[in-house]
Amino acid sequence: MSISIPRGTQDILPGNIELWQQIESKARELCANYQYHEIRTPIFEHTELFARGVGDTTDIVQKEMYTFEDRGGRSITLRPEGTAPVVRAFVEKKMFGVANQPVKLYYMGPMFRYERPQSGRFRQFVQFGVEALGSNDPAIDAEVISLAMNLYKQMGLRRLKLIINSLGDKESRQAHRDALISHFKPRIGEFCRDCQTRLEKNPLRILDCKQDRDHELMKTAPAIIDYLNDESKAYFEKVQKHLTALNIEFEVDANLVRGLDYYNHTAFEIMSDAEGFGAITTLCGGGRYNGLAEELGGPETPGIGFALSIERLIAALNAEGIGTETHEQIDCYIAALGEEARDYSVGLLQQLRLAGISAEKDYLNRKIKAQFKAADRLHARVVAVLGDEELQNNVINVKDMSTGEQIEVSLDSFVPYLQKLQSKGGN
Ligand code: HAM
């Protein structure tokens, strides 16, 4: 019986991986320009990190985590997101003490959520995310948002929609919380069991309940934006002013609450409105989380960031019909004929590769015609033919595949000859 891939995961094969690599290098390039530095944290963490960081009333913690006990009896969880781990590392490694503040970090790697797989929703997916820790300047909120928007724009996406909201500071959130409880309490019996426990524990979570989303009380629920105090309002206005100055279009959506508990002040999502993108239109989500470092045992530190999945970015590229061409080429294909020449070509190939020349040879004992075909498929710039006779004369026959020109080169000058060609071709 053959074994198949687990549900909600995917193999990314050569032919598709090139686009991934292109996106990854574009993200790294942008991060270098914006001065965000890479951080790599473990794939698994103590379960408590997410229970405390993401929030134990969230869907992620209650329903979606891959949690297991390790052989030492500790509860371990495959990371469902990157913010809590990054802030854990920030606190643990005392990065609040480094000279360069704010600390601007980025990460790229697999995340795991036990969700119902569908188009754009995987159980293992790759997030690219950034976190800026240590600044309370609304300009950094705009910087973080602009980084995400520019990655999408530079990849060619046009059908983007940025929605923002403010969840306010502690005081505003408390006022909103009270209003939510009064709003839902009289009729909480009509809601699902989860919502009933959410009412006292975390009434904000009721607003993103998938089961009860059509209940009439949902539409009339108090919006956080109406409960912002002056300070929170001023902060939100400044963020909007910066976005406008950066020419980033946005819409304020008072219903945007996000599914993780650590947010306050700015919250945002970037959506795709391309036709055929499917039901899940969110490409990227993020926001400010000023209390998280403290929650995880560190000093009070403001923070803001976002995460996006490469899978959804690729889906959006497909929905907008944006093709990405790759021009894979190799410098040289060695076509060897006869046993002695074939044996010799093994060492020659290594010489080329170590000299910085991309090269390949035949390993299937094919005839010369088939070797030329193989070279064509690899888009070889030259094919170097080595027969036993050439070997005796210490030469190799180099054919330029674009012009058809052939030239005999001594084996001693073969490497420098190809290097010269390579520098001319700008490869
Ligand atoms: P999130 O909204 O849970 O936020 O996820 C962010 C992004 O990850 C989503 O917008 C989507 O692109 C992608 N994503 C989430 N779940 C899946 C899935 N099952 N399959 C494919 N893609 C998925 C966070 O994770 C926060 N840590 C973001 C953040 C960073 N906030 C502040 N800093």
Image: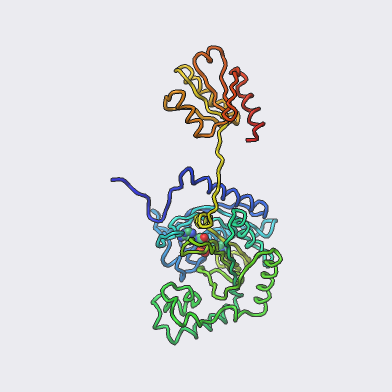
Horizontal and vertical percent position of residue 407? 60, 20
User: Is residue 266 left or right of 347 when viewed as pictured?
Assistant: right
Q: Residue furthest right?
A: 245
Q: Residue shown at 52%/52% (left/top)?
A: 109
Q: Residue furthest left?
A: 1
Horizontal and vertical percent position of residue 246? 69, 63
Horizontal and vertical percent position of residue 210? 43, 72
Quadrant housing residue 305: bottom right
Compared with 300, 35 (above or below) is: above
Figure coloring: rainbow
Q: Residue shown at 56%/19% (left/top)?
A: 396
Q: Residue furthest bottom?
A: 186
User: Foreground: 258 or 154?
Assistant: 154
Q: Is residue 297 visible?
A: no
Q: Residue shown at 71%/66% (left/top)?
A: 245
Number of labelled discs? 0
User: Foreground: 302 or 387?
Assistant: 387
Horizontal and vertical percent position of residue 230? 67, 79
Q: Is residue 235 visible?
A: yes
Quadrant housing residue 174: bottom right
Compared with 140, 128 (above or below) is: above
Compared with 324, 298 (above or below) is: below
**Quadrant where the N terminus is found in the figure:** top left
Compared with 403, 246 (above or below) is: below
**Quadrant where the C terminus is found in the figure:** top right
User: Is residue 116 left or right of 94 when viewed as pictured?
Assistant: left
